[in-house]
Structure formats: C-alpha cells, structure tokens
Amino acid sequence: ACPFEMQHWEWGYLKRLCHLELFSLEGERNSTGPIAVSADGNRIASAATDGDNVCGVSIWDVGTQKEQLHIEVDALGLGALAMSGDARLVAAVLDQTGSARVWDATTGQELMTIDRPQEEACFSVAFNPDGSRLAVGGKTGTIAVYDVLSKKLVHTIRTKAGAIEAVLFSPDG
C-alpha cells in the first residue's frame, strides 16, 4: 500500500480505473459460476453455492443489490444460465447430469426439465426475446429449440461443430 502522504489526485484516479465494478454480489452464498443479466439490466441470476456445497440459482435486484430469491438445485454445479427478456424465467444447465431446467424467477417454481441422453448432454441455454422458446446447445453439435409453455421440442438443428458451448437468439427472435 502507498503511504497516505504520497496519495495525491492520481492515487484516486488510478484506483477508480482498477476498480470499475458498480457493486459485488454479496450474500449468504458464494457466486461461483455463470451469471445471466435481464434485458433491462435490473436483475441478475447467478450460480451459487453455500459452505455445504449446496448448489442453486440466486436472483438479484441490481438497484437494491440484494438477493430476491434463491432456488436450491439438486446438482453439483451449474454449467450455463439464461434469463428471459422479461426476467420472469431463468434456465440452467446442471453439470453432472447435462440436463436443463427452467424456473419462474419470481416464485422459484420449476416449470420445465429437459433430460437428454448423456452423449447429447446440454451445454448451453438461451431464451428468445419474449421467453416463449428455449434453445439448448448440446454436446455433439445439436441445437434443440423448445416451446416453454407446451414443453415440446419444436425444432432441431444438427451441426458438425462439436459441442455447442453458447447459443443466442437474435434481438428480433
């Protein structure tokens, strides 16, 4: 640390350059994995664990910097997170099973589970802008699109790309 008598204007300037964060997610659990931000920037979903390695998804209010909801998940870790455009849904990939789940981001109620064979495990998730569809990227290059309300598979895209580590809808869906 620099002695106080040597800390002039440049000290504060350089400190601000090195610490650009607006805030840190500080709660009872450690955020240790992926995050997802709502389209309006007002909510954040983060993977979280507590001291007993209980995994879950925490929903944060950016304005208050407080955790609004914690959804406990029966998993060792989360591989990917996505939040719907209106921030009412959150989806996650469960590491050890390769399945994906969707929850109501206000109540924590589980709405959908996508179980796939281990050789076609889920790697990534993304909602379309209105939250009606969920794209799931798979281990062997398959992208599956599900209707969230009916929970039905509506489209499959097969690629030769290998694992689909990220999926994203265009802003117009």
Image (cartoon, rainbow, N blue to C red):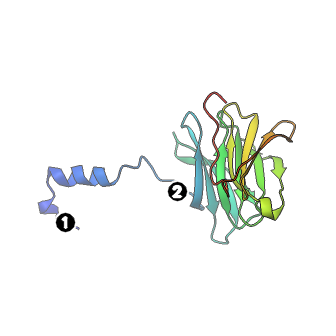
> SS at mark 2?
loop
Residue plotted at (24% across, 53% down)? 14
Q: Quadrant of the N terminus?
A: bottom left
Q: Residues within 10 Å of mark 1 (few under 14, many from 20)?
A: few
The image shows residue 16 at horizontal and vertical percentages of 29, 50
In this picture, is 35 found above or below 28? above
Q: CA distance from mark 1 to mark 2?
A: 27 Å
Tell which of 14 and 81 is nearer to you.
Answer: 81
Residue 42: percent from left, percent from top: 55, 37
Q: Do we see residue 108 in this rendering? A: no
Q: Which residue is identified by label 2? A: 26
Residue 137: give x, y in percent of width and height: 71, 50
Location of residue 111 (image quadrant): top right
Q: Is residue 159 left or right of residue 22?
A: right
- Nearer-N-terminus badge (1/2): 1
| Side of 68 relative to 142 (left or right) | left
Residue drawn at x 71%, y 63% as measured from the top left: 95
Is residue 152 toward the left or the right of residue 143 in the image? right
Question: 71 above or below 149?
Answer: below
Question: Quadrant location of the C terminus?
Answer: top right
Return the residue at label 1: 2
- Identify the residue shown where x is 63% and y is 54%: 165
Q: Amino acid at mark 2?
A: Glu
Q: Which mark is residue 137?
A: none
Query: Quadrant of the rendered structure where residue 170 is?
Result: top right
Single out the residue that lies furthest toward the top: 172
The amino acid at mark 1 is Cys
Label 2 neighbourhood size at 10 Å, few (<14), some (14-19), many (20+)? few
